[in-house]
Image (spheres, rainbow, N blue to C red):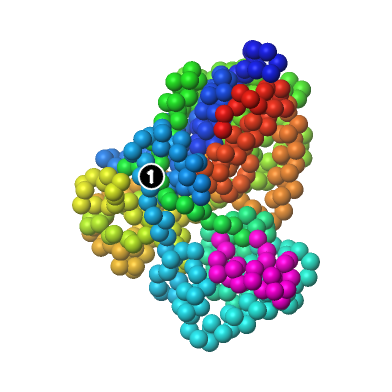
Amino acid sequence: MSSGTANERRFAAVVAGGGPAGLFAAWKLAQAGHRVHVLEREEVLGGLAASVRRGANVYAYGTHHLHSPDPAQIAPFQDLVGAELVALERRLKIKFMDRFYPYPLSARDLLLGMPPALMIGSLFSLGRALLGRGARGEPENAEEAIIRLYGRKLYDLMFRDYTARFWGVPVERISKTFVDKRMPGINAIEKLKRLLARARLISAARLGKTAVIGSGAMHTTARGVGPVFEALGDAIRRLGGAVETGTEVAAVLCDGDRVRAVVCRSAAGEREIPCDLLVSTIPIPHLGQRLRPAPPAPVLAAANRLGFRALLVVALLVRPKRRLDALFTYFPDRVFHRLAEVAGPPAQVHPPECSILVAELTCDEGDAVWNDPEAARAAVVEDLVAEGLIDRGGVLETHCLKAAHAYPRYALGFESDLESLLEHVRGYANLTSTGRQGAFQFTSMVPSMHLAWRQTQELLQRMGSHPARWKE
Ligand SMILES: Cc1cc2nc3c(=O)[nH]c(=O)nc-3n(C[C@H](O)[C@H](O)[C@H](O)COP(=O)(O)OP(=O)(O)OC[C@H]3O[C@@H](n4cnc5c(N)ncnc54)[C@H](O)[C@@H]3O)c2cc1C
């Protein structure tokens, strides 16, 4: 199947998954002269970032904006969709002690928002944590890791209930890796810690790690970010690639250490697509379960133990517009953890005097929230009424959207399961499992796309294709 000289080999690549990561890697592969075939299970491209039409409006799996600290990473998408892609100011809020503050919460807002006795107690407990009182060795779980970063008082006040509700388990059952990779830091406290460490008043080990939760302007179109991925699909087709929707990768057929074909399933039936290489962006446990011959039993068991937290989105078309003063707002004590309003511009809502309130609820596939969206919808409406954001009679339409694989679940001990599965996948000479789902990482869209292309380039290099042909 491959052609060209040793340095310029062109491969037939199958890309499993037509979300941001798969489409970006496929586009780059097609630009580099390889023959690509994207297989997407859903009818719409874009994965978690897809725009889905319901009635006269477009809805999404929660709030999605393209963002990157580096404008050069947004430029290719501006070229693809043109002026339709609009930059919005990054304005996020959080409700804390019954008031709304900019998010991430600054130390000043945090401390001044508290009654004085609580503030003094929190500072005392933070000081103890910074000086490392009572902490020995590595933290055993996310609870210990957060307490070491912020002290017990702030943990109880801000993190314990929200984190447990988001994940559906007590915080001590979550791995500390979650805190390193995805816990939003309290910026000003991080700055204070760095100053104290520089003055050698606390050890550098006390700095810990917390994630930077995005930066740069937020980009979207009148129909959400879905059009970016439709445009990527069109660009791949223009370069001679195939992009199939409604087509699920059902099995991955291997000969020894090589993938030789994928079996895909669509309304037309099952068929085999031979390939030189496979870039898989589907959830990595699903890849493990689809490999034929099947991986050794311990690897398969590890794949079966890795899981995802699901998402139910309750989107309400409401009249009149609410004009929430932020792109989205975090609510620590409502059934939804995050709320956004789609009111435009650039969004176009029909009828124009309405807006769409998008409430995000985490859940598990098959639990009460997942199985009974009507009850969840009623609870969301109750909370919105209690917040003074809607009148019961103002809801014109409701649409519930479900995503089973919204967040990789960093359960205690998941690291060894993931490593065992990754090691098995690395054993194939022409396979990479990448993107947010394929690497089991908490990456946003742009990092997911760049991860997928970087790991695809590494695979090409291993397979003997020349880097000069790859364009960034
Ligand atoms: C609520 C929420 C809000 C978010 N907001 C933002 C935001 O504002 N900005 C941002 O940058 N990021 C945001 N993200 C993160 C963003 O959604 C992800 O980074 C991005 O979607 C990852 O792309 P991906 O291609 O790796 O995975 P996905 O988007 O999950 O795509 C994987 C694709 O594989 C397909 N697939 C699965 N199994 C199969 C199979 N067997 N055969 C064929 N196809 C299959 C799926 O249908 C899907 O299309 C948000 C995430 C969530 C959950």
- The residue sitting at 62% across, 44% down in the picture is 440
Asked if residue 189 lies in the magenta stretch, the reply is: yes
Q: What is the crowding at mark 1: few (fewer than 14 residues within 10 Å), some, or many (at least 20)? A: many
Q: Is residue 268 left or right of residue 291?
A: left
- Magenta: main secondary structure: helix
x, y percentage for residue 93?
42, 63
Q: Amino acid at mark 1?
A: Thr
Residue linked to disc 1: 220
Tag count in the figure?
A: 1
Residue 35, by quadrant, is top right
- The residue nearer to you, when weighing 383 against 118, is 118
Would you place residue 321 above or below residue 39 in this image?
A: below
Q: Is residue 207 left or right of residue 122?
A: right
x, y percentage for residue 458?
68, 32
- The residue sitting at 46% across, 35% down in the picture is 76
Would you place residue 351 above or below residue 80 in this image?
A: below
Quarter of the image with the C terminus is top right
- The residue sitting at 62% across, 82% down in the picture is 124
Asked if residue 164 lies in the magenta stretch, the reply is: no
x, y percentage for residue 271?
56, 18
* Residue range of the region highlighted in magenta in the rendering: 184-209
- The residue nearer to you, when weighing 436 against 214, is 214
Quarter of the image with the N terminus is top right
